[in-house]
Amino acid sequence: MRRNLEQLGGAEHDVLVIGGGIQGACVAWDAALRGLKVALVERDDFGGATSANSLRIVHGGIRYLARGDLVRMRESTRERSALLRVAPGLVQPLPVLVPTGPPGVPGRAAFGVALTLTHLLSPARNRDLHPSRHIAAGRVLSRSECLRRFPALDRDSCTGGALWYDARMTRPERLTLAFVVSAASVGAQVANHAEADGFEVTGGAVRAVRVTDRLTGRSHQVRARQVVIAAGPWSQALAGLAQERPTPVPGSPRHALALNLVVGRRWSDAAIGLRSDPSSEADPGGSGGRFLFLAPQERTTLLGTWYGVTHSGDGHAAALERGAETLLAQFNRACPGLGLSEADVLGIQWGRLPLKAGLESGPAAILAERPRGIGPGGDGPANLRIIEAVKYTTARAVAQTVVDGVLNSLSLEARPCRTAETPLVGAELSQGDRSSVAQRILYAAEEEMGVTLGDVIFRRTELGDLPGPDREAVMMACRIVGDARGWDQRRRDAEVTSVLGAGPA
Ligand SMILES: Cc1cc2nc3c(=O)[nH]c(=O)nc-3n(C[C@H](O)[C@H](O)[C@H](O)COP(=O)(O)OP(=O)(O)OC[C@H]3O[C@@H](n4cnc5c(N)ncnc54)[C@H](O)[C@@H]3O)c2cc1C
């Protein structure tokens, strides 16, 4: 995968995708696989923003069944299967255990019905999946089995539990990269550290997008017949640059801050769902009590999720600190046996997620449930569309709809979408990786567009896993990447400083 911004600025593309998070990566892969000439630009690194900070759960849809939303339930089940099929090396089944007994949690009988229905409504969930990636049927657990699987639980209130299977992305940032690498493998031109920062609009259409190479400072005009902005929470502001009279941004917040904690302990091999007590502060995640999850990783556990609405003027660091404290306290109240303290916290992961904000029915300050798609046309240029995801889980399906629209706008015949069954490059089930760390670092730099030391350490190897890389590993990686890229000593020092100073959270 070669990064070549001169070439990107050459011939006209069918579609330019701005933003290399999971949503933009899925659009680029789908469009390229359907034979379009695609360009993808990412301001920082692929998958390094919101997409790197998710709780890593590929939702299977039981939560939507509880609300009677069968459409979303079926969509989630289908997308869980699609990800397990195309990326078995990066997505695996995840047992989820919800203990019954505490107030507000359905009882075993109710769970029994829900699990049976889920089973009956998803007959094709294991189609074409490797046996190790099959999603088994859920079941209710006895009190003793529940306590055995999650010993931190309060013995007095526990009456048993419900166990079902969702899926887990082992590394969301690598999964996003796999979509990008796959797009490049069928001809898409992709570039990270390339920021879209200006639009040439004439006759009501975008003719070219100015893309600035953040490594050299040079700008390039990238021409495309269709432009898709998939820049996550930055989408709307970016689209404003393409409008002659930008739509005024409403005073009420359009995004919630969402936060997970990474703790250095593990309690169970299952993700544990615990009912939180109703919060006294406004909760964009839903009023009243909702479920908090402990999501086990290889050596750590992710605790999520806290949501808060921040207003301009609120200090970001203060909001994160408040969110982290609140989340820790909520977990301790929901399950005192966890005995969590600040000393357990290795890091904070956060991102911004769209609120309904009057654009979707329901209270404005509640998390959006539908992807926010705008255009083409309306107040903006005729060939510009904006798409803002609400879930990592469903980004592939959303991309399918976007690319259908792009083909239609280009007056091309419909071409079938194949992203639900085409394996992603680099996401295969491996027989055990025998390459050395040094080989993986070199591969990341030379073949996976790891162009800064941070790209290689935090998003292409495990070196950056919390509690963070040690100095020796960083120096070793810098030697390999620096030699491959011909960095002088000044550049090497700057890269090392930025990695040791930054940390992945
Ligand atoms: C704490 C948290 C927990 C979550 N948990 C889950 C979960 O368990 N399961 C689930 O399915 N979903 C989860 N989500 C939601 C999911 O992570 C997001 O919906 C998804 O990652 C959004 O992807 P995206 O591509 O739209 O945005 P992003 O990942 O933010 O990508 C947008 C990209 O656009 C780039 N960009 C911005 N401006 C420009 C520009 N001018 N030029 C070029 N590039 C630009 C950015 O650098 C960024 O990389 C969670 C989210 C959070 C924050």
Image: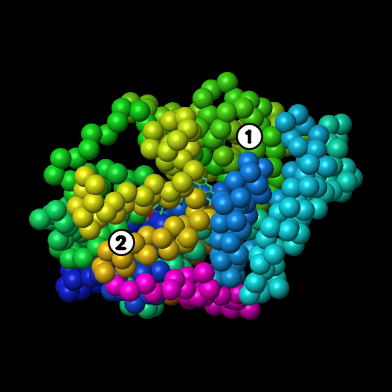
Q: Is residue 338 above or below residue 374?
A: above
**Residue beneath disc 1:** 290
- Residues tagged 1 and 2 counted as in contact (Cβ below 8 A): no
* Residue 136, numbered circle: none
User: Is residue 502 rendered magenta in the image?
Assistant: no
Q: For the stretch drawn in magenta, what is the main secondary structure?
A: loop
Q: Secondary structure at mark 2?
A: strand
Going from the N terminus, do you reach mark 1 or mark 2 first? 2
Q: Is residue 429 above or below residue 290?
A: below
Please, what is the three-letter code of the amino acid marked with disc 1?
Answer: Arg
* Residue 17, numbered circle: 2
Residue 151, quarter of the rendered image = top right
Quadrant where the image shows the N terminus: bottom left
Q: Is residue 415 above or below residue 401?
A: below
The magenta segment: 412-440
* Residue 470 pos. (x, y %): 50, 55
Q: Dot 1 surroundings within 10 Å: few (below 14), some, or many (20 or more)?
A: some
Observer-nearest residue: 209 or 420?
420
Q: Residue at x 71, y 73 (%)?
A: 131
Q: Residue at x 87, y 31 (%)?
A: 156
User: Is residue 433 rendered magenta in the image?
Assistant: yes
Furthest residue in direction left, as rendered: 202
Please, what is the three-letter code of the amino acid marked with disc 2?
Answer: Val
Determine if residue 200 is in view: yes
Q: Dot 2 surroundings within 10 Å: few (below 14), some, or many (20 or more)?
A: many
Q: Residue at x 81, y 34 (%)?
A: 101
Direction from residue 219 to residue 3 in the image, left or right: right
Direction from residue 498 to residue 428 in the image, left or right: right
Q: CA distance from mark 1 to mark 2?
A: 36 Å
Direction from residue 379 to residue 425 in the image, left or right: right
Q: Residue at x 46, y 40 (%)?
A: 368
Observer-nearest residue: 411 or 423?
411
